[in-house]
Image (cartoon, rainbow, N blue to C red):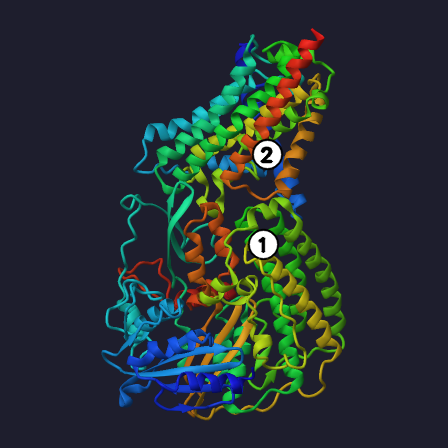
Amino acid sequence: MSAEELLKKAESLLSGVGQGTTRPEPNRLDVVVPASDLVAAATALRGADWGYLSTLTGVDLGKDANEIEVLYHVCERDAVTTLRVRVPRAGGTVPSLHTVHPNAMLFERELIEMFGVTVTGLADTSHLFLPDGWPEGTYPLLKDTDVRAAAAKTTGSEPPEMGRHGDRFIVPVGPQHPALKEPGHFEFAVDGERVTGATVRLGYVHRGIERAAENQTYTQNLYLTERVCGICSHSHANAYVNGVEQLAKIPAPPRAQAIRQLVACLERIHSHLLWLGVAAYEAGFDTLLMYSWRDREIVMDILEQLTGNRVNYSANILGGVKYDVTAAIAPVIRRGLDKLEERAKHYLHVVTADTSFLSRAQGIGVTSKEEAASLEMLGPTLRAAGVARDVRIDAPYGSYKQFPVTMVLDSAGDLAARFKVRVLEMLESIRVIRVILDGLPEGTLSVKFPRRIPAGETISRFEAPRGELFYYLKSNGTDKPERVKIRTPTICNWIYVLTKAVGAQMADVPPLLASIDPCFSCNDRMIVVNRGGGDRRIWTRENPQRLAGAQTRR
Amino acid sequence: MRALINLLFFPGGLFLILLALAYEWADRKLLARFENRIGPRWFQTVADIVKLLVKEEITPATSHPILFGVLPVVAMTGALTAALYVPLLGMRPALSFNGDLIVTLYLLSLLTMAVGMAGWNSTSRFTMMGATRALTQLFSYEAPFMLALLGPAVVAQSWQINQIVANNRGVWLLLTQPFGFAVALIGLMGKLEMPPFDAPKAKTEIVAGALTEYSGRGLGLFHLGKGIELVVGLTLIAALYMGGIANPVEFFGKTLLLLVVLTSLHAILTRLRIDQTVGLWWRYGALVVLLQWLALIVWKGVTA
């Protein structure tokens, strides 16, 4: 079905509850829904199997309007239906959608702490990203909130009591734990080796990027979004520039689009190789970690030679790219790809044939196709369960129409299938890069791009290595965006992890956690918290600057 | 005086410690090369242990402080005492009496028991899970491991290590009792919590298992104890299954060969879950050793 047909269907499904529909972009349908009809509207779409809740965005409409708009983005292939609910700025209430869309549980907790909107019917309304000691009644994403003042007022919270919690024996994992190289806090209640309960606490690296983006120009934000994540830096920047280019209605030239896709493919190889090592390490297979990280150097070297950087490639600019794939660099890339292909084939053999490895991966964390779809999981984790969902194929952006990728699917739905899918995606990326190098369009690398962007709003979806990345951008005609909403793939897979951890063996929990390829820095994005009392261990912005200065002076 | 020197410096005590550190270095270096890394420099293991021994030791408030301090000493003592009964460097064991094989096997288990108790005594959640796993693992490999080492004794018709070695001199029992040899070698890996049997200290699940709360001296002593146990275990298996140890050249040749096998297994295998470890030992390990015993007894009966 085309986007047009899909949206027609959505429109008819929502005809009973909507109060006026608009079509802001060819692939988008906006439906204004009163808060009281929200559950009915979401149920109507879900009941007809129309789409998944990609995320929800809160937008503060400012003091004059005195309203907050909550946008529920439901995506199906390339079509996006947005349910728009308006609530008063003070005391606004929306019903919870978690019975219809399980992931709404997390999105709604973010909405509560960031905007102060009350969500009814939600069991857990505690902070998801903000620290426990955050001053009450201060909501960081409201336009008139002084975030710095609020952060200064944040008090320290007591660490959770160690030992037994009643009859439950709790094993804490994180924020500092050898299993997690990034901070997140999980509590697993165990009975012997069997896990009987699981909770997650996020936000240890929340950096307030969404709020920061509102105070910076579009060009500055390019560098900000690039730093949301260290692994998929290109994905974030590319999703962002795609969005801004849609708002400005100035597409990047074909050659730039192709180069962006090429870097995205290299990034996918980089990310999957890194993940392969981490996941193997979680299961206690250190040799595979050492080998895959050695081979990751090959792709990092390619990226360095292409862009000058190994991590934040910084290939994008608004309206194009910075770096060209010259005749000199193309053979270097090809040589690297040959090596990578050989290694990827070897890893495919390891993850499908090694008995010792399979004994820890086969039949662990199994999800059926139906379950994976109903939990609204994303990315390779979802595709390993046999659900065909990939933005690059469903809603091709940039040059993905010209250089199509093939979807990699597996029906097993267990850990072993996720290894297989990711390794096959590496091989697919290698194939696509070769096609791009063969048919790289001629032309300029960038077009002139205005500083001010006309008012409007748009949605940019991008298939990052971990799954669908979702950017919502709203412009107001100035050189700074009105609202930037970033939804990373990791957050959509948490419900799955917590569901499957219960009943699993403790030893299978770290591989299970790693299997979704969690990225906490993407997921969290923390406001500098001062725990008060002049604690010198707390660093403010000045400390690292001073240190850096002292080091360079030497 | 001579006995004191024997005990403190050579072949016991100091020499054994240095030997243990050297073997640990060989293990680490070899593993690193297998994993495409460079690995530690030759003095790294010595530096590590010196660092641990001089470091401040933090005793958890909820633990019994005396027990907390004594357990590492017990662990190391067990391993050092066991060394007195085995033919280190191909020399006569320092002590020897009829039945010393059994004593040695029990002394080797003392370390695991001490680790388990240390885990319970530390009262942290990671150490408790680690202790439970360490003891579960002990009960799964211990019986097959013991039976496997008693196989050569049956052939030699003696319970005395010295006697067994003398009676079986030049006979490579690993050819006639391959299952016993395999079980003994893999049992040693289980004893030393070497991967893939490192579930009791799986860092991605329970940090460092039973020893999580140990920091300075205690950790150092446990560490040394394990190193010594590795040397003693390798010596024992080489002496019983590989035609005895006549001189230092044979000693190093045979034990290092075994070490290479252990390290290779470490490099190519994924960590087993504790239920997989228990299943492996009771389903296969115990079974093959018992079958081999049956074969031995029948053979003895026929030839007698």
Give the vertical position of A362 relative to A51 (above or below): above
**Badge 1 and badge 2 in a common chain:** no
Q: Is residue A41 left or right of residue A242?
A: left
Q: In the rendered image, which residue does mark 1 sit on?
A: A416
Residue under numbered circle 2: B24
- Tell me: A139 left or right of A308: left
The picture places residue A508, in percent across and down from the top left corner, at 49, 48
Q: Position of residue B137 (x, y in %)?
A: 49, 32
Give the x, y percent position of residue A98. 36, 68
Per the image, label 2 sits on a secondary structure element best described as: helix
Q: Residue at x 45, y 66 (%)?
A: A374
Q: Element at badge 1?
A: helix
Q: Amino acid at mark 1?
A: Ala
Location of residue B43 by image quarter: top right
Q: Nearer the viewer, mark 1 or mark 2?
A: 1
Residue B166 visible to the viewer: no
**Residue found at x 47% / y 24%:** B110
